[in-house]
Amino acid sequence: MSAYQAVAIMPTADGGSRLLDMPLALCRKTQAGLWEGISGATGWGITQGTGEGYGEWHNSAMAGLSIVLRGSWAVEAGDGARRVLRPGDMLVMLDTVGRGHRSYPLEQPCTVIGIAFDAPTEARMRQEAAAIS
């Protein structure tokens, strides 16, 4: 396996958003304590969602990853596309401008970890996502 399949949410030219399948390259251990292909991050946090129904439209506060640890949640893009994310699923959050998306937990508690990209990783992810679309 050379990639892990994720879902990305991207802004659109009209201020909306859309979802796309995005493979994430795997890193590899080259020797004890040394890894190749690690991406930079600036922060992380774990949260639980407990609301019902779609939340308000919002964009991602930062470019990064949202990884489901427990439960499940749904995300709806501005174009109406929806995905359900379950444990192990990753959302690449790139809709930091525009109307954004709506999301809500399905199975509760829904626990996710968010990881903020550093600037070079964000630029690379945006470039890779643009190449897919």
Image (spheres, rainbow, N blue to C red):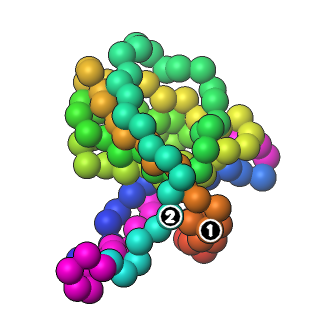
* Residue 86 picture quarter: top left
Query: Which SS class for mark 1?
Result: helix
- Give the dominant element type of the magenta stretch: helix, strand or loop: strand
**Quarter location, residue 129:** bottom right
Residue 19: give x, y in percent of width and height. Answer: 52, 50
Spot the residue most to the right.
Answer: 14
* Magenta highlight range: 14-34
Amino acid marked by disc 1: Pro
Any magenta on residue 21? yes
Residue 112 position by quadrant: top left
Q: Are marks 2 and 1 in contact (CB under 8 Å)?
A: yes
Q: Quadrant of the N terminus?
A: bottom left
The reply to whether residue 49 is in sight is: yes
Kind of residue at badge 2: Gly
Q: Which mark is residue 120?
A: 1
The Cα–Cα distance between marks 2 and 1, rounded to whole angstroms, is: 7 Å
Quadrant of the image for the C terminus? bottom right
Residue drawn at (42%, 37%) of the image:
45
Q: Position of residue 115 (x, y in %)?
A: 46, 48
Residue 103 drawn in magenta: no
The residue tagged 2 is 40
